[in-house]
Image: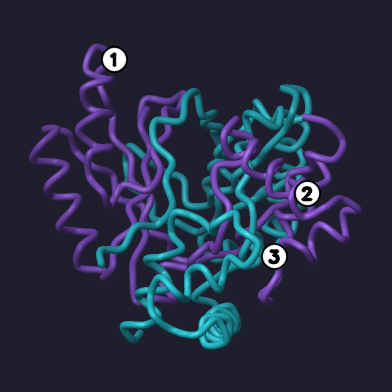
Chain colours: A purple, B cyan
Amino acid sequence: MDAIDRDIINTLQAGFPICPSPYKQVAQGLNISEPELLTRLQGLLDSGFLSRFGPLFHAEQMGGALTLAAVKVPEQDFENIADTINAFPEVAHNYARSHELNMWFVLATENPAQIEQTIVKIEQQTGLQVYNMPKIHEYFVGLKLEA
Amino acid sequence: MDSINRAIISATQAGLPLTSEPYQTLAEQIGISAEEFMQRLTQMQATGIIRRIGAVPNHYKLGYQHNGMTVWDVTDAQIDRLGTQVGLLDFVSHCYHRPRHLPEWRYNLFAMIHSKTAAGAEQQIAQIATLLGTHCHAHEVLYSTRILKKTGLRISK
């Protein structure tokens, strides 16, 4: 990753224009050509520096629901349980964490009732208690990581 | 939300096409004009359905190896005031009030921190601890050791 790649990541974290030729507009600001921006952006996605490029949706504003949940997984079952939980399309993120509650995942569903239904299914399929920790209040979401 | 907005969300949840006119490309896919597509995107952004359009970096690949979920047991009566202040810190990416699960889980304030060094993370945690002061009764930091899954939001068609 060179200085131009870093510049692209930092610029595109802040936002992306809505206009007929948005890449051209961003490329001009970066002093590179549009084809170079597209090639580099594809490269950053392929190499995993970027997880995704596009609109970030706010599930609750769409009538959907989100929650953070955790389980205590016995170490020898960790991979199997991860596979079981990740197989749910409602599981958007899942992280292993250094704690007795060692697996933390985010559920995103189209309506609030599906959160509870999914938790029940996960409990049935894993035999583990799910600690549901929905947000009571959001104080801040956002961050620009300097590339 | 109407069916066209749903189609827009469905068409963009994997990401924007890397083509010269990405909105035109997507608009054609769902059978509306590029103008309508852009107008609807603009409106979804204004109403908060879209938080932003942009790049989501992989923290680890960018060198942020120390990504901690810090959790704090904060006096309930003070949590909104303190949570707002913690959320304003420039290294905090997410800050939420979440429920306790007593007796196993006593923490009600969650703040995600990101640092390239262990020392940097320690300093960030100390800064939050100082800010919370005597209203915080205990805290822990849960570092992520592995990403098991990371996808965008999925909605069915």
Task: Work out whether B44 lies above or below B153.
Answer: below
Name the residue tied to disc 2: A10
The N terminus of chain B lies in which quarter of the figure? bottom left
Task: Work out whether B146 lies above or below A7.
Answer: above
Chain letter of disc 3?
A
Name the residue tied to disc 3: A16
Question: Which amino acid, mark 3?
Answer: Phe
Mark 2 and mark 1 lie on one chain; the one further toward the N terminus is: 2
SS at mark 1 in the image: helix
Q: Residue at x 24, y 37 (%)?
A: A85
| Of marks 1 and 3, the one in the foreground | 3
Q: Position of residue B114 (x, y in %)?
A: 68, 37
Question: Which amino acid, mark 1?
Answer: Glu
| Of marks 2 and 1, the one in the foreground | 2
Q: Which mark is residue A75?
A: 1
Mark 2 and mark 3 lie on one chain; the one further toward the N terminus is: 2
Q: Residue at x 74, y 36 (%)?
A: B126
B31 with respect to B33 (left or right): left
Q: Residue at x 41, y 65 (%)?
A: B11
Q: Position of residue A45 (x, y in %)?
A: 59, 39
Residue nearest the viewer, comparing B124 with B131:
B124
Q: Do the dots labelled 1 and 3 sit on one chain? A: yes
Q: Position of residue A138 (x, y in %)?
A: 53, 65
